[in-house]
Amino acid sequence: MKIFEKIKCRTVLMGLILASFGLPAIADELNQANTAWILTSTALVLFMTIPGLSLFYAGLVRVKNVLSVLIQCFAITCLVSIIWLVVGYSLAFSDGNAFIGGLSNFMMAGVLEETLSGDIPDSVFAMFQLTFAIITPALIVGGFAERMRFSAMLLFSGLWILAVYAPITHWVWGGGWLGEMGLLDFAGGTVVHITAGVAALTAALVMGVRQGFPQTPMPPHNMTMSVTGAGMLWVGWFGFNGGSALAANGDAGMAVLVTHISAAAAALTWMCVEWVKFGKPSALGAVTGMVAGLGTITPASGFVGPGGALIIGISAGFICFNATMFLKKKLGVDDSLDVFPVHGVGGALGTILVAVFASSTLGVFSGQGDGLPMLDQLGVQVTGVLATGGYTAVLTFVLLKVIDGLIGLRVSDEEEIEGLDINEHNERGYDT
């Protein structure tokens, strides 16, 4: 009898040990390890927007607009969360057609405690995807910073999520036509970075330059704040890319590794180019290069190896630096915080380079694409870049023009000169 009791105790103990290591529950096939990792990744990605991106952007604007950027990112987080609950998640991920999802998950109907998406709860998947939907319009803020009305920003962000983000998410990740075509976008090169970058450029062109640009210098008011926010972005990006594996496995581990390598390589490259061109490396260049490296590796992070990530990071630092200089210095476009040259160009570059470095035929630079036809895949990747970029540009332009006609996009010249903190929020970022 004692022998059977010992066996029973050991069985119970072994069950507890196996559960602690996240082995699937036999009854419902829930994987506890995967669930725990995606819950952690969800927190990391939300951390990227508030406070990471908020502080990064706030430090880059002038002192009279610091609070406006912070509250814009915060308000977008709140607004998009409600839209995602009501209809955004359903349009992106429920069954529909090749271009848009249906309404079967309206108000997240069917997302219950016991329902699963793969081997993680539906609720965890929906919340993880929500954090991506939040950061994308928050990135666009950098394109029109210091000159858009708060009311216009809210209306634009809400409509943009429905008209641009949700459909493109469905195209790529929700069973739509680009996913069916075989587009490789592991964590959002098209869905997040190309859409945000192109939308920011469109907004900058529609709204025009800030008062005094480019004659009046407009340096960041607080680089300490920006470097702090950039560090938060770097750490949070491990959840952004690693979490996109939707499992605690080797794909997630490799995604985290290549993400880090690309960020480091791009930051160093940007600093070196800046050092050669201007005689000194800057903190602004270092953190901007880092963000470029993170954005560029995002679509490739689940498909390339460390060697490929190194080349992608170096390419991101060099190409995005020159794109920034060309856009502002040569073309005179006032994309206030360089969203398009960093995220748009970086996202497109990374999406295209997936076809090259996912190949298993490049020796130490090989990725995980066994038998991947490089040229055929390159055609698919370019199609994805052009389709998402073109659609975003057209719909963003239409939305901006409609909103401008309804309530006006831009604050008055006098309000812009005095600053948005006082005129839009009746507050100051700092006591003076």
Image (tube, rainbow, N blue to C red):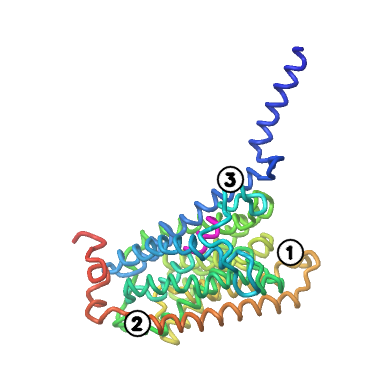
Contact (Cβ within 8 Å) of mark 3 with mark 1: no
Q: Position of residue 352 (x, y in %)?
A: 65, 74
Kindly identify the residue that appears in the image at 36 percent across and 66 percent down: 72
The answer to whether any part of residue 402 appears in the image is yes
Distance from disc 3 to disc 2, alpha carbons, whole Å, reads 45 Å
Distance from disc 1 to disc 2, alpha carbons, whole Å, reads 52 Å
Distance from disc 3 to disc 1, alpha carbons, whole Å, reads 30 Å
Relative horizontal placement of residue 206, taking residue 3 as reference (left or right): left
The answer to whether any part of residue 235 appears in the image is no
In the image, 285 versus 423, the foreground residue is: 423
What amino acid is labelled 3 in the image? Ala
For disc 1, the marked residue is 366
For disc 2, the marked residue is 406
Q: Position of residue 174 (x, y in %)?
A: 63, 66
What amino acid is labelled 2 in the image? Leu
Q: Quadrant of the N terminus?
A: top right
* SS label for mark 1: loop
- Write the start and end of the magenta stretch as one range: 126-134
* SS label for mark 3: helix
